[in-house]
């Protein structure tokens, strides 16, 4: 990420910046905190608020022009009537960054009256989200049409140790989300299984982790017939990427983060419809989320042991592709009847979840753009959450709320298992249309034995096909925030 973050403890009124964003609640009034800013603007702020030209509604903005030096522009950004939270500040900061990009100011300073340390993290994550773009494959516009990109963000915060820690955490998560989003935005011919291996090795080198990469032969030796059945239709080498971070005691069991990394999903022989298939480059968002979380973890240096596992391949139709009706064997010995080759993510995750058991983990959390059914059930506002352990599920739900990636728990009742029974194998890889997200999670549970496990279905939240106002269409960064909050919540346990 090219965005540079700095921390300032200066009074907002004396900040030298081409654009100062002030995040205000609904129906703001002049007070002692705003008075110095109003003085620097020769009373323009007081007149604006008195006339109610700006009312502080969520995402509302109003631009005031300052002088040639000091605060050259003042942007009022509303956070709405709700409480000051990290999520509210993140959204408002993202709105400010998008305005800075449109104006071409190059730099942005962000402040808010009475900001808390918990909310302050949102300044960095929000600015990064609003400023984020992926111009790598586009021809730059003519020089006369270019605007200066946003390259510097200053968080103007009180001079307290808690604020410095919040700033550092916000920067770490922002870098992690930027990595996940960049991987998501890459086309399927650019982001390949080898890309995940390369990024894993880079993370390991920069942050003192250990990276292990397995290919087709190594996975075959481990009996990963479920994973490899998805990869048998493509000439690209599948990759299992393992990243080990050891910040805790040598004998402390790790938290294991698992991600589905389908670099592109055509559906295989059960081919998807052509319309909107290009969005299936985002079928690797779970894997991107794991790498993003490991990037943030490497910057935070948390005193934990954490392992990231990624299963990366491409689901393609070909003369060698797995077919409906085929039976494959997973690494725990269970046989699986392939009913629909487009239910491939669970086949990849199955062997990863079995592989995770060898680490005697304290907790395993997987994330995957697994089912279209979760979009039907929860839309684009909530992550589907399923778990084998009530305490672990509650922990993950709380982490998602703190991160601004809220989830909703769905049941894993034994009655649903009837839908994935097979006449010729131990399991079917799909249970039909009804309760599709639940039966997919039930399938995964068959391979998540011996440890607390939680599954995140992020099919509705990992990317957006429409501009959301505060962030552009495309990747959202989910589930990086949730993963990081799970890890931060375990420090000291």
Image (tube, rainbow, N blue to C red):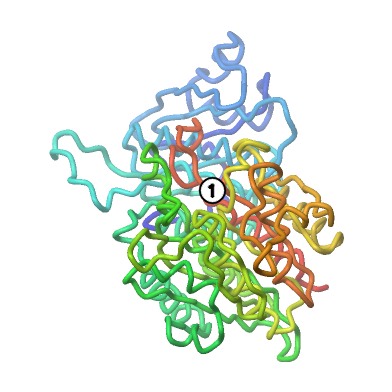
| Picture layout, residue 2 above or below residue 155 | below
How many tags in the picture?
Answer: 1
The percent position of residue 168, horizontal first and vertical second, equals 58, 61
Name the one closer to the observer, 219 or 63. 219
Name the one closer to the observer, 477 or 379. 379
Left or right side of 143 for 208: right
Q: Quadrant of residue 71?
A: top left
User: Which residue is at a point 40% across and 52% down the rendered structure image?
Assistant: 266
The percent position of residue 151, horizontal first and vertical second, equals 36, 50
Name the one closer to the observer, 270 or 113. 270
Left or right side of 387 for 122: left
Q: Which residue is mark 1?
A: 462
Mark 1 neighbour class, 10 Å CA radius: few under 14, some 14 to 19, many 20 or more: many
- The residue furthest right is 390
User: Which residue is at a point 69% across and 84% down the rendered structure image?
Assistant: 359
Q: Quadrant of residue 434?
A: top right
Name the one closer to the observer, 223 or 149. 223
The percent position of residue 199, horizontal first and vertical second, equals 41, 72
| Picture layout, residue 305 above or below residue 424 | below
Q: Quadrant of the C terminus?
A: bottom right
Is label 1 in a helix, a strand or a loop? loop
The percent position of residue 270, horizontal first and vertical second, equals 45, 51
Q: Quadrant of the N terminus?
A: bottom left
- The residue furthest front is 423
């Amino acid at each position: 990420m090219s965005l540079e973050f700095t921390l300032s403890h200066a009074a907002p009124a004396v900040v030298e910046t081409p654009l100062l964003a002030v995040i205000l609640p609904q129906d703001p009034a002049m007070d002692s905190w705003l008075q110095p800013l109003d003085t620097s603007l020769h009373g323009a702020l007081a007149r604006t608020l008195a006339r109610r030209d700006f009312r502080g509604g969520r995402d509302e903005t109003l631009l005031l022009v300052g002088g040639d030096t000091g605060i050259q522009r003042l942007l009022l950004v509303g956070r709405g009537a709700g409480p000051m939270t990290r999520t509210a500040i993140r959204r408002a900061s993202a709105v400010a960054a998008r305005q800075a990009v449109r104006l071409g100011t190059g730099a942005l300073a962000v402040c808010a009256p009475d900001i808390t340390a918990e909310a302050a993290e949102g300044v960095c994550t929000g600015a990064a989200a609003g400023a984020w773009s992926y111009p790598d494959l586009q021809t730059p516009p003519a020089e006369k049409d270019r605007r200066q990109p946003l390259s510097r963000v200053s968080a103007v915060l009180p001079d307290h140790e808690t604020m410095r820690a919040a700033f550092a955490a916000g920067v770490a998560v922002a870098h992690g989300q930027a990595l996940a989003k960049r991987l998501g935005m890459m086309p399927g011919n650019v982001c390949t299984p080898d890309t995940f291996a390369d990024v894993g090795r880079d993370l390991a080198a920069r942050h003192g982790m250990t990276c292990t990469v397995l290919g087709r032969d190594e996975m075959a030796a481990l009996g990963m017939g479920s994973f490899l059945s998805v990869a048998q239709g493509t000439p690209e080498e599948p990759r299992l990427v393992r990243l080990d971070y050891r910040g805790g005691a040598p004998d402390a069991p790790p938290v294991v983060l698992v991600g589905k990394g389908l670099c592109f999903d055509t559906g295989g022989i059960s081919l998807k419809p052509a319309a909107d298939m290009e969005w299936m480059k985002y079928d690797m968002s779970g894997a991107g989320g794991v790498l993003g979380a490991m990037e943030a973890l490497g910057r935070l240096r948390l005193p934990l042991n954490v392992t990231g596992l990624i299963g990366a391949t491409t689901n393609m139709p070909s003369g060698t592709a797995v077919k409906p009706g085929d039976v494959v064997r997973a690494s725990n010995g269970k046989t699986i009847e392939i009913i629909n080759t487009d239910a491939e993510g669970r086949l990849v995750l199955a062997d990863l979840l079995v592989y995770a058991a060898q680490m005697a983990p304290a907790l395993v959390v997987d994330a995957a753009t697994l089912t279209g059914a979760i979009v039907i059930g929860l839309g684009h506002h909530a992550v589907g959450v399923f778990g084998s352990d009530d305490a672990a599920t509650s922990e993950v739900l709380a982490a998602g709320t703190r991160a601004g990636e809220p989830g909703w728990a769905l049941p894993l009742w034994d009655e649903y298992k009837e839908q994935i029974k097979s006449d010729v194998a131990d399991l079917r890889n799909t249970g039909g249309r009804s309760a599709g997200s639940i039966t997919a999670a039930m399938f995964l549970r068959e391979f998540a034995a011996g440890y607390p496990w939680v599954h995140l279905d992020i099919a509705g939240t990992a990317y957006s096909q429409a501009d959301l106002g505060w962030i552009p269409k495309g990747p959202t960064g989910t589930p990086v925030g949730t993963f990081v909050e799970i890890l931060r919540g375990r420090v000291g346990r």
